[in-house]
């Protein structure tokens, strides 16, 4: 059974079309990354799943239940980290958790959950109104974990977290998935999802423009990888040697640098070719593709995600 099924979901807010007929399926046990820039429709999609927003057209099912008819059954089995959730200023961290534990009839020690998200006993006793943004985000994540939910819906879970916090969040996502939970999480940052997700959906202007495994997504991003190499001397022979490396699609020369566009997995081959041409590599830097560049790779004049990669490869060969 699919954990999430959206079928032709369209949402109109007055003159604004937030979703343009989204079809999306997340299988049970998957970690699904929902990527898109600001205003793409990520939160609206999540709000439809939770029946906070009713679709103008289309249907949505979560854990086998229709979102409009059986939202209570869905919420009992779902842990949610909403975007921009406001904590209750006058309740302590521990009281927040106790409230959720009571309402879900769950048996779990609040201290254990708080510890899992990196909040200690002293934090637990403090009123959440004095929490930093990252602490509040950790608390809300702990609240989402109460009761070992079958489905976790996390809207921009890394928001406000420092790098350690973001790593902790990814570890928790993996642990929850190993326990058996399906995880659906949205982000506008490619790096947040690529290391944990089995599959990624990319939404732009209310339309799902691509849906792929990380492997295929990576293939598309390979096209965009840029390797900038500082060399001690720039000779025609070295430029020609780099051009001949399979997977290199372009070589630009600027000053003492070679700017090489190539597949991510052949970066070492490029460096080896430079050294074999008798030139010393003084430094190198890689430019990872941004989400915008990834969108371009998926949407440039075609609905076929891989065709841009294929075209770019052909250009390089020509
Ligand atoms: N309640 C609302 N009333 C009017 N327009 C809305 C409402 N909610 C969302 N929208 C519009 O729908 C579009 C999609 O918004 P949504 O919040 O779903 O995007 P998002 O991908 O979650 O963006 P962000 O990353 O900024 O949170 C935007 O144009 C937004 O202005």
Image (spheres, rainbow, N blue to C red):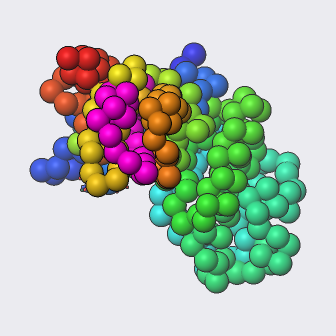
Q: Residue at x 19, y 30 (%)?
A: 300
Provide residue 64's location: percent of width, then percent of height.
54, 23
Q: Is residue 190 left or right of residue 181?
A: left
Residue 108 seen in render: yes
Q: Residue at x 77, y 76 (%)?
A: 123
Quadrant in which residue 277 is drawn? top left
Quadrant in which residue 227 is drawn? top left
The C terminus sits in image quarter: top left
Q: Which residues are magenta?
A: 219-243
Quadrant in which residue 222 is drawn? top left
Q: Is residue 239 magenta?
A: yes
Q: Is residue 5 above or below residue 79?
A: above
Provide residue 87's location: percent of width, then percent of height.
59, 70
Q: Is residue 255 above or below residue 225?
A: below
Q: Residue at x 55, y 53 (%)?
A: 157
Provide residue 262's location: percent of width, then percent of height.
38, 31
Q: Is residue 15 magenta?
A: no
Residue 223 seen in render: no
Provide residue 86's location: percent of width, then percent of height.
53, 69
Q: Residue at x 66, y 53 (%)?
A: 167
Q: Is residue 276 above or below residue 72?
A: above
Foreground pick, 210 / 76: 210
Q: Is residue 282 above or below residue 67?
A: below
The N terminus sits in image quarter: top right
Q: Is residue 147 left or right of residue 284?
A: right
Foreground pick, 270 / 176: 270
């Amino acid at each position: 059974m699919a954990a999430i099924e959206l079928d032709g979901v369209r949402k109109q807010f007055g003159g604004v079309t937030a979703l343009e007929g989204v079809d999306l399926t997340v299988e049970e046990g998957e970690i699904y990354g929902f990527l898109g820039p600001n205003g793409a429709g990520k939160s609206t999609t999540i709000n439809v799943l939770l029946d906070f927003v009713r679709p103008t057209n289309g249907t949505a099912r979560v854990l086998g239940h229709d979102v409009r008819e059986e939202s209570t059954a869905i919420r009992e089995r779902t842990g949610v980290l909403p975007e921009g959730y406001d904590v209750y200023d006058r309740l302590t961290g521990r009281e927040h958790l106790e409230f959720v534990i009571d309402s879900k009839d769950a048996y779990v020690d609040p201290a254990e959950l708080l510890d899992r998200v990196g909040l200690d006993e002293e934090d637990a006793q403090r009123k959440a109104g004095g929490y930093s943004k990252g602490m509040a985000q950790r608390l809300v994540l702990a609240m989402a974990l109460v009761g070992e939910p079958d489905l976790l819906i996390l809207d921009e879970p890394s928001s406000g977290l420092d790098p350690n916090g973001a790593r902790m969040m990814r570890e928790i996502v993996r642990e929850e998935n190993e326990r058996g939970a399906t995880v659906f999480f949205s982000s506008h940052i490619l790096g947040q999802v690529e290391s944990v997700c089995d599959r990624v959906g990319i939404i732009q202007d209310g339309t799902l423009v691509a849906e792929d495994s990380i492997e295929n997504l990576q293939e598309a991003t390979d096209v965009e990888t840029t390797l900038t190499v500082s060399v001690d001397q720039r000779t025609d022979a070295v430029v020609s040697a780099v051009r001949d490396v399979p997977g290199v699609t372009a070589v630009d020369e600027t000053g003492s640098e070679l700017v090489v566009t190539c597949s991510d997995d052949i970066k070492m081959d490029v460096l080896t070719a430079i050294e074999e041409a008798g030139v010393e590599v003084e430094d190198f830097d890689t430019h990872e593709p941004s989400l915008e560049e990834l969108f371009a790779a998926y949407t440039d004049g075609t609905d076929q995600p891989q065709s841009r990669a294929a075209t770019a490869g052909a250009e390089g060969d020509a």
